[in-house]
Image (tube, grey):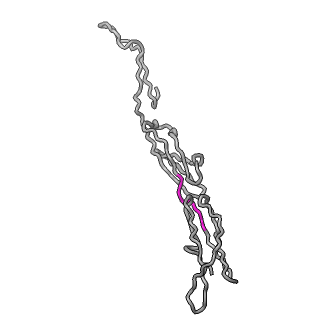
Amino acid sequence: VLQVNGDKSVVQEYGGVYTEVGARAVLKIPLFDDLIIDTPITVEHAVDPNTVGHYPVSYHAKFLWMEADVGRSVFITDTAPPMITLVQNSNSYTLPGHDYVEEGFSAFDDYDGDLTAKVTRNVSGDVVTYTVTDSSGNTATVQRTIRFDDPVPPELTLAGEKEVVVYLGRAYNEPGFTAIDNLDGD
């Protein structure tokens, strides 16, 4: 009888090192304890710890006229979610009542690589939610709070000279002015 060392089903995270723990051959004799025999055991597998998937491992042993086979299943999985990185400018702001202008973002997954093109954005109020899912179904979500601000004061421009001389008893004639604001306009 062939007995696998360890579990018959192994789940391992992608990118690790697969260590084959082997099997042992046991001679079963009625009315006696099992006898572990020293016989060569052949192992066949193509486990690739850098590729997600199911990999069967087979063991075969031959002792005198007896032969035995046993198997193990190795599952290489990707359970780590992607990482979304937000570009943030500490001086950035959005004028109240205006649409948010994206500052930038990127998404990377250890297994799938660059996922930036697969990121979805949802703007709701003053929050932008970024979401991306990798090929293994792992999802990452990050949020950005939009800073609504109007730190620029209106610009007041006088027409004519800054100093005007008005003679006593005469009326002042306003030469004009304009007031423009980046948010409120004229």
Q: Residue at x 59, y 77 (%)?
A: 24
* Furthest-left residue in this view: 168
* Foreground pick, 138 / 182: 138
Compared with residue 142, is residue 183 higher up or lower down, i.e. above or below?
A: above
Residue 78 image offset from top left, x and y in percent: 56, 59
Compared with residue 57, is residue 162 higher up or lower down, i.e. above or below?
A: above
Residue 26 image offset from top left, x and y in percent: 60, 82
* Foreground pick, 54 / 22: 22
* Foreground pick, 95 / 66: 66
Q: Which residues are magenta?
A: 74-82
* Foreground pick, 42 / 92: 42
Q: Residue at x 62, y 64 (%)?
A: 47
Residue 44 image offset from top left, x and y in percent: 66, 69
In which quadrant of the rendered image does the N terminus lie?
bottom right
The image quadrant of residue 180 is top left
Residue 152 image offset from top left, x and y in percent: 41, 30
Q: In the picture provided, is 184 more to the left or to the right than 76?
A: left
Q: Residue at x 49, y 37 (%)?
A: 98
Q: Residue 7 colored magenta?
A: no
